[in-house]
Amino acid sequence: MSELFTEGTSIEDDRAPAGPIEERWDKRRFGGRLVNPANRRKMSVIVVGTGLAGGSAAATLGELGYHVKSFCYQDSPRRAHSIAAQGGINAAKNYRNDGDSIQRLFYDTVKGGDYRSRESNVYRLAQVSVEIIDQCVAQGVPFARDYGGLLDTRSFGGVQVSRTFYARGQTGQQLLLGAYQALERQVAAGTVEMFARHEMLELIMVDGVARGIIARDMVTGEIETHTADAVVLASGGYGNVFFLSTNAKGCNVTATWRAHRKGALFANPCYTQIHPTCIPQSGEHQSKLTLMSESLRNDGRVWVPVKKDDTRKPADIPEDERDYYLERIYPAFGNLVPRDIASRAAKNVCDEGRGVGPGGLGVYLDFADAIARLGRDAVAAKYGNLFEMYERITGEDPFEVPMRIYPAVHYTMGGLWVDYDLQSTIPGLFVIGEANFSDHGANRLGASALMQGLADGYFVLPNTISDYLAKGPLEKIGDDHEAVVEARDSVRDRIEKLLSIDGDRTPDSFHRELGAVMWEYCGMERTDAGLRKAIDRIRELRQEFWTRVKVPGENEELNQNLEKAGRIADFFELAELMCIDALHREESCGGHFRAESQTPDGEALRDDERFAYVAAWEYTGHAPVLHKENLEYEYVKMTQRSYK
Ligand SMILES: Cc1cc2nc3c(=O)[nH]c(=O)nc-3n(C[C@H](O)[C@H](O)[C@H](O)COP(=O)(O)OP(=O)(O)OC[C@H]3O[C@@H](n4cnc5c(N)ncnc54)[C@H](O)[C@@H]3O)c2cc1C
């Protein structure tokens, strides 16, 4: 493997204070320097991204009095991908009195992440979760309420309490509207300047420090320079490297990848979450997969026929010929096992030839029992919009026949490495939300991404960034500064190169092929031989891309092919790093399942002796350099994860 990467010095997070874990966040806030309100007005911060992480951060920094420039590639900030989030947001409120606590949310998250996340960060996340709900309720987010008017909750995978707050199947939308209103209030107040339809294509670094971005106006093609005292990336996840995923089509890695190329370490790129409950792919023409929220597993029962190749209609298969395999294998958590476990179990039964639907790539998610127990109206009240969405896409009514579901790429736990302050290895570059390598270790629990995005944006970043900004205001950077000119020229050169190839293949055709390689070899199950094959194929494809891609049109117009081509070029480089990361991690953990490392009953087998670290990769232009951050567990004992 040594030809693929080299190993460098270890890396450490020196920002989390020592001492009792429950006091660390308070200590850090007290220890950090502050910027007085009059000085804040003189400082500027660029925030790339207007999803839950970026929207909440920009609004909060604006409210604090900083001058904020907020960017997104959509036509409106409220169309960020966060709007698609369905099921809910976790918080350790313990309104149900069912044994929940900050300690339990912390424990569930560390365990759920298969002991590959940082204890200090996860504990802080659990603490802040409580404040998020209060903040959102104050904004008017219409969370579901119970009969008595109190906030309602439901359960998500990997936990035995009910701590997920929700707004039907539109939680992301409602939360994003809350953040968006807060953001627009600041736009009106003049503290936030909004740049919609702008795509960040390069990071500006001056003397080793992040000082701005180069962005393309996606309507006119103008290449713009924006400088600031600090840059925050909240650009979301990179699941679309697989082409087919539940992510919005626009989700991409460009913002973080450009920063990686400039020196920000990229952590755990191979940790991808495959969500067990998505509508199965229906054909080759498809460009997107649809999630059916995990919340459905509160009431839906997952099953397949006991017999192989059983093509009878589900209603014709009697109870004793059905295998409710999650309830059978994992009686303690049943249908609510975490996503990595449920996904692999679905793959296993399909590999055995017991899958249902076209191609045998599906399992049933059946609501018959819930409808009989609760009544149709109660089920409709909880999941109505999800049922409707399913029916529109498949033409089948889940009130009458079980849903068919299959795992699909959904979320990326990897991302830019950040310390406890959410600062990357580039001073002045902060990374929040799904874009950082986050608090979820090797597997994110359901309803925890919204929690993390809002924790970062409303509460953590606004506190930690002041410690950095207290050094400022930094010297102003002119558009003619050497580093700015270099960054701008590199963006122009790349665009020109993409437009000039004039080959015979569309950007999409490359993306589709890259995605198929990634799904086959770096998807639900990975092997040494498969990953090596993938790396070779990705390199060949990338070369072909740079000689055969055809990007019609020009830069000075709305040109979606040009946008796609730039993103796909970055996906190629990321894909190779993902495979190298997956190859070097010769253990199974969470969403990363190495076929060579499993227990006798087929569960993921970790190797804590060799791999209890965050793998943070440095870009070199050739073989990347691996820096390890060792993970230590003082408060949660590392054990083999069991949901049985
Ligand atoms: C279908 C679906 C359902 C989900 N349901 C849930 C759920 O119920 N609960 C839960 O906790 N999680 C859920 N998740 C996960 C969760 O929605 C995401 O992890 C989260 O919303 C990410 O938020 P974010 O702010 O980090 O990024 P995003 O919401 O993805 O926002 C990214 C922002 O960055 C901008 N951007 C990106 N690149 C650039 C660039 N180069 N230049 C300019 N702007 C850029 C985009 O325009 C956008 O504004 C779901 C995910 C999916 C796919």
Image (tube, rainbow, N blue to C red):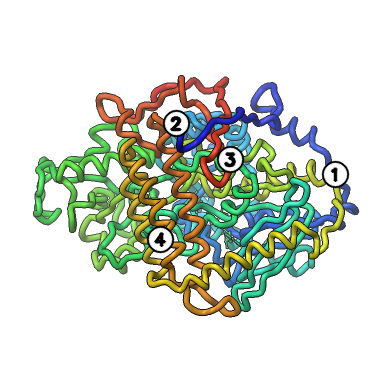
Observer-nearest of 425 and 347:
425
Q: Indicate the secondary structure of the residue bearing disc 4.
A: helix
Rendered residue at 42%/71% (across/down): 503
Number of the front mark, 2 or 1: 1
Where is mark 3, residue-wise? 618
Q: Residues within 10 Å of mark 2 (few under 14, many from 20)?
A: many
Number of the front mark, 4 or 1: 4
Where is mark 4, residue-wise? 544
From the top left corner, tell me how far across and down residue 279 is, in percent. Answer: 31, 57
Q: Indicate the secondary structure of the residue bearing disc 3.
A: strand
* Mark toward the start of the polypeptide (4 vs 3): 4
From the top left corner, tell me how far across and down residue 99 is, in percent. Answer: 49, 31
Observer-nearest of 142 and 422:
422
The relative height of residue 319 versus residue 214 in the rendered view (above or below) is: above
- Residue 465: tell me if it is visible: yes
Q: Quadrant of residue 484?
A: bottom right
Identify the image quadrant of the C terminus.
Answer: top left
Number of the front mark, 3 or 2: 3
Where is mark 1, residue-wise? 471
Q: CA distance from mark 3 to mark 2?
A: 24 Å
Where is mark 2, residue-wise? 114
Rendered residue at 31%/48% (across/down): 520
Specify the amino acid type for callout 3. Glu
* Mark toward the start of the polypeptide (2 vs 1): 2
Observer-nearest of 126 and 546:
546
- Residue 445: tell me if it is visible: no
Q: CA distance from mark 4 to mark 2?
A: 38 Å
Whether label 3 lies within 8 Å of ligand 1 gets the answer no
* Mark toward the start of the polypeptide (1 vs 3): 1
